[in-house]
Image: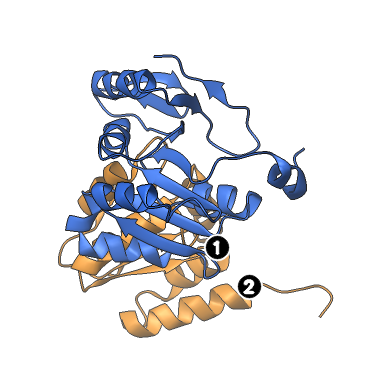
């Protein structure tokens, strides 16, 4: 099973997962980390320790440019089987948890990105 | 509330020198860079230069309209002395107070230093919610202040600076 690591500012990741599980029920092979109170070096060590070795994983981060993004990108640079995706939102996570056993990692990454973007709509259009 | 205009009118000495152990991150590239319309972000850090993957990632988060550089401490001090850092809206980031002291010893003409973010580590004690200091941090800051540098704490442009008296 493809693993999920959600790394965000504050409690954003924990709340996202809480809401996802209220929609889909409890999920396995998922962990949440926060940058709260951590310098970059400390966060890098934390992410390193939680990325499953030798297993396929997607690292979800809240925005491109924050310390969660930097720390995850640094780790994924060393490990070919994990990929960082930024801009995590509810549609991205519900897509991931409902489709992760149905397709290979490369296809899943494209699919969850498309679903995340499709979730952003203007009422005026 | 501060508008961009009032912040821009406020007098700042460039380069702004900020100690922040998250290096280039949200508070810097969004909080400060947008409010002060920064044109250049420089990280002066010897450690990061030994970690090519991290260096590349840090440079990749700099917004496209801002120039980003990572120099070692000696090079940053040399460039500043030659006047290469103070003619545009530049912020210089240092990882911790000991690096700030090293920059000063390499001859950088630092006049003011802002402590922007120093997070908890086992050897550090809380000074402000966003500033934790070890005995080495405090010793370095004492020496920096003795050299005539004004030190204050401020995490974001809209929060009030807190003077630091070592």
C-alpha span from label 1 to label 2: 9 Å
Subunit bearing disc 1: A
Quadrant where the image shows the C terminus of chain B: top left
Question: Pointer 1: residues within 10 angstroms few (<14), some, or many (20+)?
Answer: many
In the drawing, what numbered circle is on residue A119? 2
Q: Are marks 1 and 2 on the same chain?
A: yes
Image point (38%, 49%), residue name: B80
Q: Residues within 10 Å of mark 2 (few under 14, many from 20)?
A: few
**Residue at image location 61% in from the left, 39% down from the top:** B157
Pick whichever, B156 or B36, lies toward us: B36
Rendering colour (chain A): orange
First in sequence, mark 1 or 2: give its number: 1
Q: Is residue B118 above or below residue A105?
A: above
Label 1 sits on residue: A89
Chain B: drawing colour: blue
Helix, strand or loop status at disc 1: loop
The vertical placement of A95 against A52, above or below, is: below
The reply to whether residue A120 is visible in this rendering is yes
Q: Position of residue B22 (x, y in %)?
A: 38, 45
- The answer to whether the residue labelled 1 contacts the one labelled 2, judged by CB atoms less than 8 Å apart, is yes
Name the chain letter of the residue that bears numbered label 2.
Answer: A
Relative to B58, B111 lies left or right: right
Q: Residue at x 24, y 68 (%)?
A: A77
Closest to the observer: B124 or A22? B124
Instruction: Where is residue B95? Give x, y as percent.
Output: 32, 41
Q: Quadrant of residue A5?
A: bottom left
Q: Residue furthest front?
A: B82
Q: Quadrant of the N terminus of chain B?
A: top right
Residue occupying the point 54% across, 56% down: B88
């Amino acid at each position: 099973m493809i693993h999920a690591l959600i790394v965000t500012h504050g409690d954003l990741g924990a709340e996202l997962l809480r809401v996802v599980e209220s929609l889909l029920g409890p999920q396995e092979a998922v962990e949440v980390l926060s940058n709260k109170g951590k310098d970059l070096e400390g966060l890098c060590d934390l992410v390193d320790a939680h990325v499953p070795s030798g297993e396929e994983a997607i690292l979800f981060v809240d925005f491109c440019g924050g310390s969660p993004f930097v720390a995850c990108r640094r780790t994924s640079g060393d490990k070919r089987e994990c990929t960082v995706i930024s801009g995590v939102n509810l549609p991205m996570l519900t897509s991931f948890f409902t489709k992760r056993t149905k397709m290979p990692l490369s296809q899943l990454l494209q699919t969850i990105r498309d679903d995340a973007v499709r979730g952003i709509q203007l009422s005026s259009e | 509330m501060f508008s961009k205009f009032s912040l821009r009118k406020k007098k700042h000495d460039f380069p702004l020198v900020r100690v922040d152990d998250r290096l280039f991150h949200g508070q810097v590239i969004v909080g400060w860079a947008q409010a002060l319309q920064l044109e250049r972000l420089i990280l002066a850090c010897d450690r990061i230069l030994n970690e090519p993957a991290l260096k590349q990632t840090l440079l990749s988060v700099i917004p496209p309209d801002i120039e980003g550089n990572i120099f070692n401490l000696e090079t940053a001090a040399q460039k500043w002395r030659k006047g290469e850092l103070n003619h545009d809206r530049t912020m210089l980031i240092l990882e911790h107070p000991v690096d700030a002291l090293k920059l000063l010893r390499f001859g950088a003409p630092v006049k003011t230093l802002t402590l922007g973010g120093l997070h908890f580590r086992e050897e550090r004690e809380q000074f402000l919610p966003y500033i934790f200091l070890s005995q080495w941090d405090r010793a370095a800051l004492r020496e920096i202040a003795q050299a005539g540098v004004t030190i204050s704490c401020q995490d974001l442009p809209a929060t009030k600076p807190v003077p630091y008296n070592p």
